[in-house]
Amino acid sequence: MAALGVHRHRGRSRASSSSGCCAGAAAACTAPGLALILGGALGNLWDRITIGQVVDFLLFHWREWSYPAFNVADSAITVGAALLIVDSFRMRRPESQES
């Protein structure tokens, strides 16, 4: 039930007041990370199917230096992968059995 913002605490339910995907102990970055990766991949796939190529429209440069062009779908994939990496380093506590 953590995805809905409700956490169990000593047999009682309470609403979560934390915001952000990695804020609470019960919240995880896995679901948002996978959603961003899947959304970005589907966005790139849609471009590939409908227009035959992925349109990269964000290009940053400064003097002689330029960063490779990318799009919003690429950014979503990158952020999703970063969330999964952050989640892999988080310490997990085993859930206690309540009677």
Image: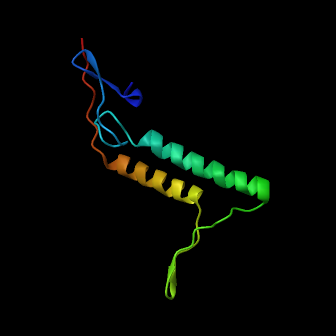
Residue 1 drawn above or below residue 50: above
- The answer to which quarter of the image holds residue 24 is top left
Residue 57 drawn above or below residue 81: below
Colour scheme shown: rainbow
- The answer to which quarter of the image holds residue 19 is top left
Looking at the picture, how far across and down is residue 60, in whole percent? 52, 75
Query: Total of numbered circles in the picture?
Result: 0
Which residue is drawn at the image coordinates 26% and 19% (left, top)? 97
Q: Residue farthest to the top?
A: 99
Q: Could you tell me which quadrant the C terminus lies in?
A: top left
Q: Could you tell me which quadrant the N terminus lies in?
A: top left
Which residue is drawn at the image coordinates 78% and 58% (left, top)? 51
Judge from the rendering whether residue 46 lies leftward or rightward of residue 64; answer left or right.
right
Which residue is drawn at the image coordinates 36% and 46% (left, top)? 87
Looking at the picture, how far across and down is residue 16, in whole percent? 30, 29
- The answer to which quarter of the image holds residue 9 is top left
Looking at the picture, how far across and down is residue 37, in whole percent? 54, 49
Residue 26 drawn above or below residue 85: above
Judge from the rendering whether residue 53 lies leftward or rightward of residue 28; answer left or right.
right
Judge from the rendering whether residue 2 lies leftward or rightward of residue 34; answer left or right.
left
Which residue is drawn at the image coordinates 64% and 66% (left, top)? 56
Residue 60 drawn above or below residue 44: below
Judge from the rendering whether residue 1 lies leftward or rightward of residue 35; answer left or right.
left
Looking at the picture, how far across and down is residue 66, in whole percent? 52, 80
Q: Residue farthest to the left?
A: 10
